[in-house]
Image: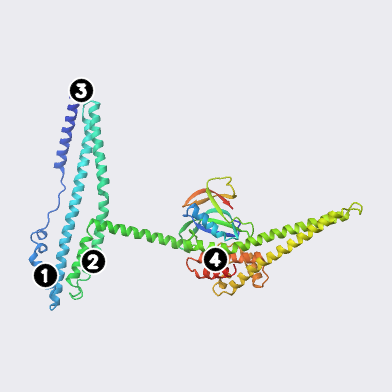
Amino acid sequence: MDCDLVVEIDAALSLSDTQERCRVEQADVYQLAQIEIGTVTNDDGQVLLVNKACFNEKLSGLLKQLSFVEGSVATKPDWTKLFECDMYVESHVTHVSVFGQ
Amino acid sequence: MGTRISSHRRAVSHAAVVTLLVSICLLFASTVRAQKKPPILTDKTISAFNIGEIERLQTAAAERSKPEEAMLARNKLIAITVEQIDTAFNEYRTKSRKQTDRLNFLFDFLEIGASSAISIVKGTLRAKSMIGEGLSLFQGTRSAFNKDFRFLEKQILFDKMVAKRSAKLAAIYNKFNQDVVEYPWEQARSELRDYFFAGTIDEALSSLSRDTGAEAVTAEEALIRAKEEAGIVGKVTKLEFDADAAFTKIINPITTANENAEKSLNKANEDIAAAEKTIKDEKAKPAAEQVPATITAAEQAKATAETAKTAATQAKTKQLDKMKAIYNQVADNPTLAPMLTTISTGKGIQPRQRQKIEDSLKNASENNGSFDDYQRILGNLRRVVVALVNKDPRPNEEFQKILVANQ
């Protein structure tokens, strides 16, 4: 993932909770660019499922609000489509369209 | 018609006879019998049910002037009570098992008998169909019994009772060597009551539910800890949400004003360039073709654009000063200053971004930072402070104070 910041988000979160987590992580200086499914292995060897959220720095023209929609959705009125991806929603792989505003 | 009814009756009566014969054979073939109790364990002869003996022992156990005898009497009382409780428990367990076994045998017998009768009977299809319906009835009834009376779950509960009883009894036996002052009969009786309740269905259910719940909570807590230790972020908490909203409320107007000023500045520069080109193009024409009004209008447009440029530059400087003031106060704050060094090395920051943040920190510390430098530093500091707010709210409180003072 070619990005400025990667945040590992709990795969067990709902779609709206993951959306809210990504909005907060943007911190008005990063723009969400991609989400990939992945795993993290802790020191005890336990494998944990995560969504790897990739952000790029954007100091102006940032789309601060995010909207995650399940499925492949081409457009959403007044929103700019950022990308589509497969991500974990409540620990299940789901196809999601991500919009910014 | 009459012949057909008589054929049905004959088939059903044949089936009944066959079923009866099979049942008689099975009943007589059954050889499983309960063991006889040894004479010493017969209820009538043992002291466990001798009220007079119990009263004598209770008096002796209360006699503190003879500690050895009192201890012996107390221990005898404990042993008697344990025997009574064990007798009650074993009878209950035996009765429960017998009931289950009888019902299971009855259902087995009826199902086998009915299914065999279908093959043996010589009647018409109707007769066989009736026996088949009967078989379905037996099977359905067994299924309902198993479901409603939870026969299978009972064994789990008995196992739980046995485990709980053993633990309680071991705790009581461990106090056998203590004297009656330290461990009086009254306390032993109270613990024996717990031992009795450990052998009841209610207590087993309650204990099973408690244990399972506790195990689930422990596993859940371990998973949450594992996720935290691995640096995995979860749902946004209220504290995080509030901290984030407070930053946005103060920083957003500054960044928006800077963006607008930047746009105005770009527009002014474009207008100045366009006016200068117009003037240049007009003056490049032969004197006879030049239009003085065009040059005058372009000069006026240029002057207006330069005024706008000055205003935009001042607006940008104002916003830059606000960001610089916030940064300087952060850098002087004993709680926040040490955190500045961590914003470039935090989890997830990629190498190229790390370099950018470190360059911005260097520029800012030399009082030479651009608006972007301060925005980058404060934005990344905000991420760190918000991420920390659940465990340590102090950095957030300090940061908010500085932001409000510069609002």
B386 displayed left or right of B180: right
Q: Position of residue B153 (x, y in %)?
A: 27, 51
Q: Which mark is residue B170?
A: 2
For residue B132, above or below residue B360: above
Task: Identify the residue at horizontal 15%, vertical 36% (top origin).
Answer: B20
C-alpha gap between disc 4 and disc 1: 72 Å
Q: Quadrant of the N terminus of chain B?
A: top left
- Determine the secondary structure under disc 1: helix
Q: Which mark is residue B384?
A: 4
Task: Identify the residue at horizontal 21%, vertical 48% (top origin).
Answer: B100
C-alpha gap between disc 4 and disc 3: 91 Å
Amino acid type at image mark 2:
Ala
> Residue under circle 1?
B57
> Residue under circle 3?
B4
Query: Are discs 4 and 3 located on one and the same chain?
Result: yes
Task: Identify the residue at horizontal 27%, vertical 46% (top origin).
Answer: B147
Amino acid type at image mark 3:
Arg
